[in-house]
Amino acid sequence: MTQRSDPNDLTKCPLCGQPNECAVAAGRDPESCWCMTATMSPSALESVPAEAQGKVCICARCAAGTPAGD
């Protein structure tokens, strides 16, 4: 079951609620983020709630198309 997180919590994936490991949210250089070299699942990106789009990063697991709990 999908557990969405608070769209204002920049450290949690808005799709599964797990830590997103976002470098920007942690105050690090954006170029050091895992997402800079990851392949994103188009369906995962389309699933991000409108209120979180462009604000909160998804986690690597959801980005790969395998959300936590699946």
Image: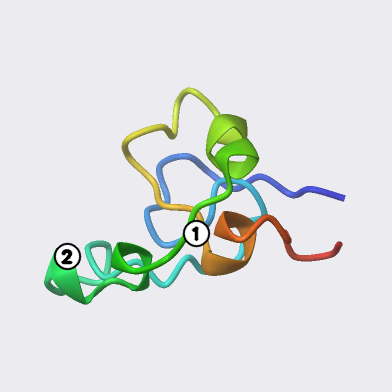
Say how the picture is coloured. Answer: rainbow
Q: Within 10 Å of the Cα at label 2, are there few (<14), some (14-19), or many (20+) other Cα atoms?
A: some
- Along the viewing direction, whichever of 52 and 62 lies nearer the viewer: 62
x 41%, y 32%: residue: 53
Tag count in the figure?
2
x 60%, y 65%: residue: 18
Q: At numbered mark 1, what does the secondary structure look like: helix, strand or loop?
A: loop
Q: Within 10 Å of the Cα at label 1, are there few (<14), some (14-19), or many (20+) other Cα atoms?
A: many
Residue 8: quarter of image: top left
- Along the viewing direction, whichever of 41 and 22 lies nearer the viewer: 41
Name the spot of residue 5 as percent of width and height, x first.
59, 48
Residue furthest to the top in view is 50
x 26%, y 70%: residue: 23
Name the spot of residue 68 as percent of width and height, x first.
75, 65
**Nearest to viewer (mark 2 / mark 1):** 2
Q: At numbered mark 2, what does the secondary structure look like: helix, strand or loop?
A: helix
x 52%, y 62%: residue: 59
Disc 1 residue type (three-letter): Lys
First in sequence: mark 2 or mark 1?
1
Query: As displayed, is residue 11 above or below residue 8?
Result: below
Q: Which mark is residue 47?
A: none
Please give the residue where the numbered disc 1 appears in the rendered image: 12
Name the spot of residue 4 as percent of width and height, x first.
66, 45
Give how far apart the Cα atoms at labels 2 and 1 are: 17 Å
Query: As displayed, is residue 10 above or below residue 28?
Result: above
Q: Which mark is residue 30?
A: 2
